[in-house]
Image: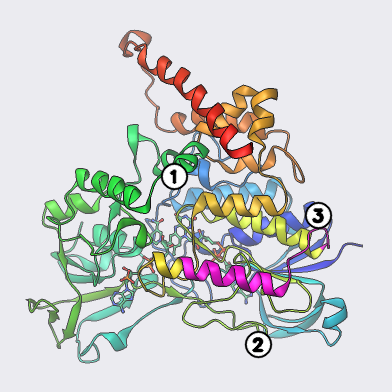
Amino acid sequence: MGKKICVIGGGSSGLTAIKACVDEGLEPTCFERSEDIGGLWRFKENPEDGRASIYKSVIINTSKEMMCFSDYPIPDEYPNYMHNSKIMQYFRMYAVNFDLLKYIRYKTSVCSVKRHPDFATTGQWDVVTECDGKKESHVFDGILVCSGHHTFPHLPLHSFKGIEKFKGQYFHSREYKNPQAFHDKRIIVIGIGNSGGDLAVELSSVAKQVYLSTRRGAWVVNRVADEGFPLDVVIYSRFKLFIKQFMTTEMINSWAEKKMNARFNHENYGMKPKHRITHQHPTLNDDLPNRIISGKVLMKCNVKEFTETDAIFEDGTVEKDIDAVFFATGYSFSFPFFDDEVLKVENNKIPLYKFVFPPLLEKPTVAFIGLVQPIGAIMPIAELQARWATRVFKGLNKLPSKENMLADIAMKRREMESRYVESPRHTIQVDFMECLEELACQIDVKPNLLRFLFTDPKLAWELFFGPCTPYQYRLTGVGKWSGAREAILTQRDRIIKATKTRVLSDDMKKPTSAIPFLLKILSVFVVFAAIYFVYM
Ligand code: FAD
Ligand code: NAP
């Protein structure tokens, strides 16, 4: 009999955690407090307690090839950036394909997770769940926490003097569903993260005026990058990671900021922050500059004070007769089912080894899945975390000593604090590729480029120059998937197919020049040099 594992939450992290358990011969039971899978991505007309809530129009900002699970590509006809309804379809297909639904108990909340009296020897947990008002006790050998981190609103009303006098409506962005009720209204959106940007754009299509207020500004990045490819496809490749080693942060910042300013000058659009582009979680928005140039959205600094009807900004300007204020001020996370002695979250700071394992437990039988804020997609990271955690639960992988784990946690925290501007949104930041590679090394599934260069040069080429898609971590080792090579070699076709819905006849295509061919030859030398540099 495999060990019994409790998976808390049936969102995208929970689904891949169930699959990781099954793949390792463990026995998962997933408790999901709502009536269905999908977590945040399942849209409902009204927000529900304890589950993240999205607006009807949300389109993901990570592209399909970079966000899919590593052994289940997203259909080629699906758009690169999917609407939430399409994302749900994908998660359902994944769950059905791998027969995961039978492990889920719906409408069942996990109320408490406590150490079993024999924890020091068995690593077991006493879990209490509640379904239809009835409590039930269970004993589990391991816990995978997949309860998400965009559920509890961060609503800093204390920072906004006079808000209690304000006679208009105010909301957190999690309550926003669609713009219908805001026709001809004068609206302030506070915060310029991805929610603030999306809300300002959408509301401005119906409102009389939208003001987007930011205390710090932001660099705004396009989803659609060079030649119309998705941004994450363009920026995340092993080749670019290799080049990055030779660039200083100043060089990266200058290059990226120049690109952002070439699209629209951030200073002229009232958006420019004091900090550099890599010092803040990026805001992706293709439409915001269009709304600003047409005057539908006006940029403002931080609100100093509200009166009954007006907002007074820190620069002394006043906007009168405000009807509604949206606080797109982010989220806090917590895990109310754990005692503080097991885990304490303070100001969104949580001490976890590689953002997965609490370091001080006698037995490593609890792991957090998806509790990261990558500059890129969460799903493939959550998947690798779950693959690693389940092997640790089985005793096939060992964690380092407590001292080494604490040192790693402290180092990561120092790096984060020195890089990012101080904000509760910057406590679980990870770089997408670096995080994937680090996790892949834990279970030895990082592809060996040198080996592929000699055995399968075509694949080696795509692994090095192509986007670092999740399939790369299914080529070898534990959990190897026979379709991984094919998925990698056809990934560009799937990206293009979704946009090239009007196919040109041959006589309409541009003649190709000899230069790309010469560049390819030059690149072959670069590959050899890079691999020599990395492996020799
Ligand atoms: P969730 O999707 O939040 O699922 C958690 C599940 O756990 C829920 O179903 C909940 O009901 C259940 N649960 C919680 N507590 C309990 C309990 N005690 N007992 C039982 N069940 C419980 N990420 C990206 O990678 N790309 C994006 O473009 C992107 N866009 C986003 C857009 C918005 C508006 C927001 C808010 C977030 C976005 N994210 C994005 C981040 C998002 O958190 C992840 O995409 C993803 O949903 C995380 O999945 P999860 O399973 O970890 O958490
Ligand atoms: P967020 O990224 O945490 O951004 C919060 C914003 O509010 C920041 O601009 C922050 O400013 C500001 N803020 C916080 N406290 C404030 C205060 N006291 N006074 C003034 N401003 C304050 O939250 P989010 O935008 O809701 O995004 C949450 C997650 O969802 C992110 O992962 C995001 O990528 C994702 N998301 C994705 C999409 C999409 O895919 N389309 C859409 C929405 C959200 P500072 O920077 O100064 O702290």
Q: Main secondary structure of the magenta part?
A: helix
Crowding around mark 3 (Cα neighbors within 10 Å: few <14, some 14 to 19, many 20+) is some
x 88%, y 62%: residue:
2
Question: Along the line of sight, which residue is nearer the eye, 178 or 419?
Answer: 419
**Range shown magenta:** 394-415
Residue 111's spot in the image, x, y percent?
66, 83
Asked if residue 207 lies in the magenta stretch, the reply is no
Contact? badges 1 and 2 (CB < 8 Å): no
Residue type beneath disc 3 = Glu
Residue 440's spot in the image, x, y percent?
66, 50
- Quadrant of the rendered image containing residue 488: top right
- Whole-angstrom CA distance, mark 1 to mark 3, is 36 Å
Q: Disc 1 on helix, strand or loop?
A: helix
Label at residue 244: 1
Locate the C terminus by quadrant: top right
Q: Disc 3 on helix, strand or loop?
A: loop
The tag earlier along the polypeptide, 1 or 3, is 3
- Whole-angstrom CA distance, mark 2 to mark 3, is 29 Å
